[in-house]
Image (cartoon, rainbow, N blue to C red):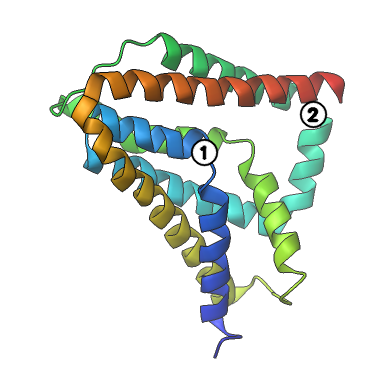
């Protein structure tokens, strides 16, 4: 029945698709990894970010308002998040791109971890899910427990992975001008990270 677990799955999938499509640090990282390396490495980042999205959605369902209020009140945490994004922006902007199809085994192991780190540091994820859950509650009376919660989280994972894999597929055409595309993606990703970091710092200072 549509009011059963399948509805929770569909709602989670659609909400995550909508939330992932706008350019942000995660999908830009997927694009950069695909351009610099290959589709398989970009998919690793996408899978890692999808697992983190499950955790962030679960946190929002259980402790959303508590965490939101904590972040609003804790200047140190917000400043640390802002600094992390500014540092990441600086590293990516200044790094000389090395687009290659072959990487050593130690570097290959880092792509999944890269996806975990970028996704976990995203300060917009939990607030997005708080907003999304509030919007969903206007149309559905959901209780995120048991099999319904599991179905919702599976939908979240699938929605994230489908959207990010779309970026993997779309970015493969950039491989025809590999080094030039890599520089461009580096600049765009660094700019997005810098904007997030500066805006987080500004909000922390003026709050």
The spot of residue 123 in percent (x, y) is 63, 35
Question: Residue at (31%, 39%) from the top-left corner?
Answer: 171
Among the two numbered marks 2 and 1 on one chain, the one whose residue lies closer to the N terminus: 1
* Residue 7 position by quadrant: bottom right
Identify the image quadrant of the N terminus: bottom right
Q: Is residue 196 above or below residue 164?
A: above
Say few, some or many: other residues with alpha carbon within 10 Å of mark 2 (under 14 / 14 to 19 / 20 or more): few
Residue 185 or residue 11, whichever sits in front: 185
Residue 197 or residue 108, whichever sits in front: 197
* Residue 178 position by quadrant: top left
Question: Residue at (57%, 74%) from the top-left corner?
Answer: 8
Q: Is residue 109 visible?
A: no
Residue 32 or residue 5, whichever sits in front: 32
| Disc sitting over residue 74 in the figure | 2
Residue at disc 1, secondary structure: loop
Identify the image quadrant of the C terminus: top right
Say few, some or many: other residues with alpha carbon within 10 Å of mark 1 (under 14 / 14 to 19 / 20 or more): few
Q: Which residue extends farthest right?
A: 207
Q: Which residue is mark 1?
A: 23
């Amino acid at each position: 029945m549509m009011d059963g677990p399948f509805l929770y799955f569909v709602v989670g999938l659609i909400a995550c698709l909508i939330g992932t499509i706008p350019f942000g640090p995660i999908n830009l990282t997927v694009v950069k990894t695909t351009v610099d390396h290959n589709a398989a490495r970009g998919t690793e980042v996408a899978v890692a970010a999808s697992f983190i999205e499950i955790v962030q959605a679960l946190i929002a369902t259980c402790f959303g308002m508590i965490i939101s209020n904590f972040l609003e009140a804790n200047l140190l945490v917000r400043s640390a998040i802002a600094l992390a994004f500014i540092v990441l922006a600086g590293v990516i902007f200044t790094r000389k791109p090395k687009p290659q199809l072959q990487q050593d085994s130690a570097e290959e192991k880092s792509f999944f971890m890269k996806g975990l780190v970028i996704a976990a540091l995203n300060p917009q994820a939990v607030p997005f899910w708080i907003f999304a859950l509030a919007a969903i509650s206007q149309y559905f009376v959901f209780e995120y427990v048991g099999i319904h919660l599991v179905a919702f989280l599976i939908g979240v994972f699938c929605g994230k992975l489908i959207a990010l894999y779309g970026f993997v597929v779309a970015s493969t055409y950039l491989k025809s001008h590999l080094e030039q595309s890599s520089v461009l993606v580096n600049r765009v990703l660094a700019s997005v990270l810098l904007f997030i970091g500066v805006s987080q710092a500004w909000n922390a200072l003026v709050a």
